[in-house]
Image (tube, helix red, strand yellow):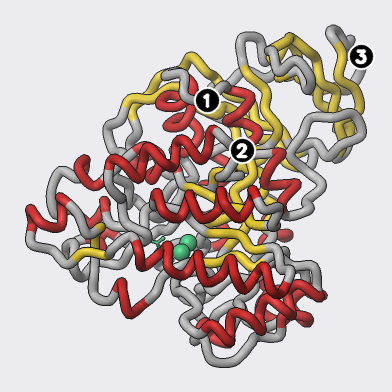
Amino acid sequence: MKILIKNGMLIHPVTKKLEKRDIMIEEQKIRQILPEIDAGENVAVINAADKFVAPGLIDMHVHLREPGFVHKETIESGCRAAARGGFTTIAPMPNTRPVTDSSEIVKEVISRADKLGIARVVPFGAITLREEGQVLADIAGMKEAGIIGVSDDGVGVQSSKMMKQAMELARSLALPVVAHCEDNTLAKGGCVHEGVFAEKFGLRGIPSSAESVQIARDILLAEETGAHYHVCHISTEQSVRLVREAKSRGQKVTAEVTPHHLLLCDEDIPGPDANWKMNPPLRSRRDRAALLEGLKDGTIDIIVTDHAPHTEGEKKKGMSLAPFGIVGLETAFPLLYTHLVLKGVLTLAELIEKMTERPARLFQLPYGSIVEDGTADLTIIDLKREKEINPEDFASKGRNTPFTGWKVKGWPVMTIKNGQITWKEPGFYMQ
Ligand SMILES: NC(=O)N[C@@H](CC(=O)O)C(=O)O
Ligand SMILES: [Zn+2]
Ligand SMILES: [Zn+2]
């Protein structure tokens, strides 16, 4: 089927200004981008007047929970959440049960996602067997099966020796090492940032050094091994400084940040409600400022959600006992558009770049831009539409968000992946 998107606003690749364009999609490709295209016969026309058309959003850090934790999320519910949030490509972390540490599980995840066709799923494989930090996983086999990088997300790799071996192997396979950075001897037992909130509520804190110490170690190991080292969910001022310094020396070190670490700090936590509990925790106001600075100056390369669904029952256990993590796929774009773009922190083009083209480049994925003959992954967004965040609307099984009730603008109204409509806001106009 041919689809014609009429009168949408696109970011010009050079001037970065918005301009009105028609886009013709045929099969899985973008065939034409022109100021005016006639529909002709047998073409479905989408009226995108006053709407912004972005490349399909890419999220390089999500948790789909299948296999093993399907009460929290399934590949299907997670992909539906992605499509509803405007994402066409998502990269699930391997901390499922069993852990994604073999080519069989990698193939299984990819084939289930392919059959559904709701979002393109490009998985990470584990660094170590069962993410236990003891024995390297079959990284070469998993690469054959389709992984795009390795990560033990959920836990830090405690042994320097293990990390070094992983980097050597990953380097030889041209795979990035994507690190959840957490030194257990420093973080042990903490549930929130070691700061004002922890003190006020008498909770055990996780110091910033639990993250930054491991980043410092890993940057040295990456220098020695030549691996591409990517820092997961960076959260502290010191971590940003380390990445900036490594980049300035020309090292291949990259980093990602989440919307919640960009928009919230520990002072904002209203009380001991586990919907505000995630790993790494919300840090200080100063850390948050350093993250924004790092994002603006390019030290931090991309934005990811770290979508981490948990059940209401699990989250009711309170700050100390509830699992870490919040959902993010269905709120990321409107939150960032409202609080970064509309407040002048980033331009719309900069925000989009960090959610499309940059992640595609970092992980060598052939997506993330709107070009003729390119894959037809597109997200149509109503930048003016304002709506309250209501977890009851989520396609995700997870309702665990600290952003309930936030009034935000910039809601996706249609998501197209590989030339197929994967989600559409009810009532969004189509001829
Ligand atoms: N971010 C979180 O708070 N939780 C993640 C694990 C992780 O990303 O480290 C999860 O799997 O629930
Ligand atoms: Zn993590
Ligand atoms: Zn994660």
Q: Is label 3 or label 1 in front?
A: 1
Q: Residue at x 71, y 19 (%)?
A: 11
Label at residue 40: 3
Sequence-wise first label, 3 or 2: 3
Confirm whether residue 94 shows in the render: no
- Which of the two residues, 401 or 24, is positioned nearer the viewer here? 401
Q: Can you name the residue that lies furthest to the bottom here?
A: 135
- For mark 2, give the secondary structure: helix
Spatial CA span between label 3 and label 1:
39 Å
Label at residue 101: none
Note whether ligand 3 is within 8 Å of mark 1: no
Q: Residue at x 67, y 39 (%)?
A: 356
Residue that badge 1 annotates: 346
Q: Residues within 10 Å of mark 2 (few under 14, many from 20)?
A: many
The image quadrant that residue 166 belongs to is bottom right
Sequence-wise first label, 3 or 1: 3
Amino acid type of the residue tagged 1 in the rendering = Leu
Confirm whether residue 285 shows in the render: yes
Spatial CA span between label 3 and label 2:
36 Å
Amino acid type of the residue tagged 3 in the rendering = Gly
Kindly check if marks 2 and 1 are in contact, taking CB atoms under 8 A apart as contact: yes
The image quadrant that residue 246 belongs to is bottom right
- Which of the two residues, 125 or 405, is positioned nearer the viewer here? 125
Residue 358 location in percent, x, y?
A: 69, 42
Residue that badge 2 annotates: 354
Q: Residues within 10 Å of mark 3 (few under 14, many from 20)?
A: few
Amino acid type of the residue tagged 2 in the rendering = Lys
Kindly check if marks 3 and 2 are in contact, taking CB atoms under 8 A apart as contact: no
Note whether ligand 3 is within 8 Å of mark 3: no
Q: Residues within 10 Å of mark 1 (few under 14, many from 20)?
A: some
Residue 307 location in percent, x, y?
A: 46, 53
